[in-house]
Image (tube, grey):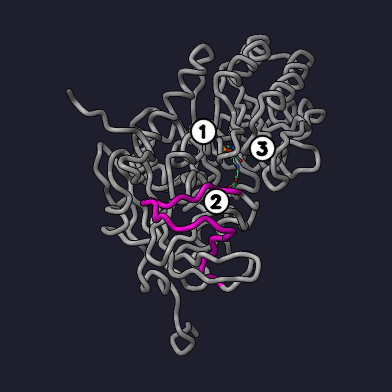
Amino acid sequence: MAIETPIGFQRRSGELQADGVPLEEIARRYGTPTYVYSAALLEARLRALRSAFAALAPDICYAVKACANLSVLSLFARWGTGFDIVSAGELHRVLAAGGDPRRVVFAGVGKQRWELERAIDAGVGRFNAESAAELERLGAVARERGVVARVALRVNPDVDPRTHEYIRTGSKENKFGVDLDRAGEVIRAARAIEGIDLCGLHCHIGSQICEAEPYVGALRRIRAFFDDFGRAGFDHLDLGGGFGIDYGDGREMDFAVLASALQPELRAIGLPLVLEPGRSLVASAGILLTRVIEVKAGRDRSFLIVDAGMNDLLRPSLYKAAHRIEEVRPSGAPTHRGQVVGPICETGDFLCEARDLPLSPAGALLAVRDCGAYGFAMSSQYNARPRAAEVLVLEGRARLARRRESFDDLLRGELASDLLDG
Ligand code: LLP
């Protein structure tokens, strides 16, 4: 009887593995801190989304910003997704990964003229415009190139997605999109601009949203818009992404619940659906491996000082995001009030706030869970720390997907003062 390889991050004989590969082995081979992704889990998440939404047959455009590693992008290309990008840099990555530019949607506030030019020259299939001024810019670039750009207008439906304030994007005080009350006027003006085909509506109300209700609320308002304005000339509705995952508190968006909650409004609207999921496809498929450097006793807690800091994983510092942190091999150390902190010179440098955890000894390997989204993607070289390695476990084998940066990488492109121009 064949032994089935467990998918994702699971324990065998107590030890945490990635698609059957021991994480200790990966840490020994590639060092720490290192991001590890499970290709099997990525694929399973995509399959789960597709099957929950099967009746609506959405065009799934993976949101590159969540995890832009080339190996991850090329897997999504192989699995037939499109891509949601927000910069010319992300376009560069998608093309390098073999993505089809016609399946790319270029979203994002503040696109510059040169970015629009690059996107049009590369043959990007669709744009999501955020303002009347952007539609003018896009039209001018398309006319110069003698093409017609397909574009959706991003509307702001003014709903409360009940998520962290920094990642709410669909309420009227946010910078995103055009107020639905003004959308008709902006669309009428856009349809008079040569070089663009205003053929869709787009909205993205926020991220880490765990309930269907805010999406349904947004759709109701969008349906009212269409009922009033008409559907002529529209060929798609892009609902964005934002589907929340379970970081350990049991709250998450259930794809099937969402799909069935959206169905009545979508049927009434009657346009093909586009989705731009990022986090929900990749977050649980990635972990951050880090080693304990030392344990330091504080007054009201112990500090587990580890070799990953806020430069490697910013989410806890920026959003107070709580990630589960586990020993890869149970050390048997006593549980105590402790905080996992990095080596960076700021009190805000922590991987978790104080909680009860085993006081793992120096050298112990820890796994910070659910770091596949907005983990490496938001990392930096702060404190002159080379960025971490990224490892992809594919078909049961760990492979280096991005080598750890070197000290030379830290200096690339810089000059000392005696070598400056002029
Ligand atoms: N589409 C648009 C237009 C977006 O702005 C975003 C995310 C997405 C799709 C994908 O959203 P997702 O499915 O990943 O929630 N750094 C934050 C999250 C920022 C999300 C920005 N926009 C975090 O670590 O929680």
- Residue at left 64%, top 31%? 210
Which quarter of the image is occupied by the N terminus? top left
Numbered disc in front, either 3 or 2 = 3
Q: Which residues are magenta?
A: 322-344
Dot 1 alpha-carbon crowd within 10 angstroms: few under 14, some 14 to 19, many 20 or more: some
- Residue at left 19%, top 25%? 2
Asked whether the residues under the numbered discs 1 and 3 touch, taking CB atoms below 8 Å apart as contact, a structural biologist would say no
Q: Residue furthest bottom?
A: 418
Residue that carries the numbered disc 2 in the rendered image: 114
Name the secondary structure under disc 3. Answer: loop
- For residue 147, the mark is 1
Query: Could one spot residue 29 in this view of the protein?
Result: yes
* Viewer-nearest residue: 319 or 414: 319
Is 291 a magenta residue? no
Residue that carries the numbered disc 3 in the rendered image: 206
Residue 5 vertical placement versus 301 (above, below): above
Q: Quadrant of ligand 1?
A: top right
